[in-house]
Amino acid sequence: LIQTAGEAKDTGAAGGLVSITGGLASTFYGSLGGTVMVTAGASNSVSADVSGNGGDVLVAGGYAAGAVGGSIQLLSGFSSATSSGDVEVLTADSGATGVSGSISLMTGDSLESNSGDITLAVGTSFFYGLGHGGSVSISAGAAPDAFGGAVNVTTGSGVSSGAMDLATAAATSTSGDMSLTV
C-alpha cells in the first residue's frame, strides 16, 4: 500500500497533507477514542540472518533543498480535565537467544555550524505549595547473576573538551542536596 499526497508546483504552495485520525468517541460516558496503530510486516522465516527480519517502521521529516528540513514531533494527548497522555519509547524483550533491542538518541553531524543539542527537561509544576517538579532518572540495567550495566557520561572532545557541570538549582528556601555513593 502506497499513499502519497499531491505535488505542489506553484510558488508558495504546500504539498498535500496526509492525515490519519482515530475515530471520535462521542458518547458522554465510558467511551474511548479510536487508536491509530502502525505495524510493520511480520516475518515467518526461520532464517537467522537479516533476510528473516521483521519489517521496519520508518518515520522521516521532509527533505528541503534550500531551507530547514521537516521536523518530527511525538506529542501525547491533552486532557482538559486530568493528566495528559504518556509518551513511551520501548524495545521488545529478546527471544530465546540474542539481546533486547537498543535505543539510540543522537543528533546529526554539521559541516558549517554547531551540531544539534539533546535536551532532557521536565515540565514545571504550578500547583502552589503542593506540586513537585518531575524527576529525571537514569539507570543502567541490572544483571542478577552477572555484571550490571555501566553509566558513562563524557563531554565532547576537541581542541578544548566540553565542560561538565553538576549542580543543584537555586531555591527560595533550601537548595537540594547532592550525593555520590559508591
Image: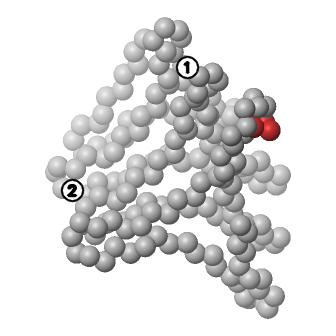
Q: Is residue 6 above or below residue 157?
A: below
Q: Residues within 10 Å of mark 2 (few under 14, many from 20)?
A: few
> What residue is rendered at 45% in x and 12% in y?
144
Q: Nearer the viewer, residue 105 or 164?
A: 105
Q: Residue furthest left?
A: 129
Q: Amino acid at mark 1?
A: Ala
Counting from the top left corner in percent of width and height, residue 134 is at: 33, 45
Q: Amino acid at mark 2?
A: Phe
**What is the distance, in whole Å, between disc 1 and disc 2 at their CAs?**
36 Å
Counting from the top left corner in percent of width and height, residue 165 is at: 51, 34
Q: Is residue 89 left or right of residue 126?
A: right
Give the mark nearer the N terminus: 1 vs 2.
2
Q: Nearer the viewer, residue 173 or 68?
A: 68
Residue linked to disc 2: 127
Counting from the top left corner in percent of width and height, residue 132 is at: 25, 46
Determine if residue 158 is in view.
Answer: no
Disc 1 vs disc 2: Cβ atoms closer than 8 Å? no
Asked which secondary structure carries label 2, the reply is loop
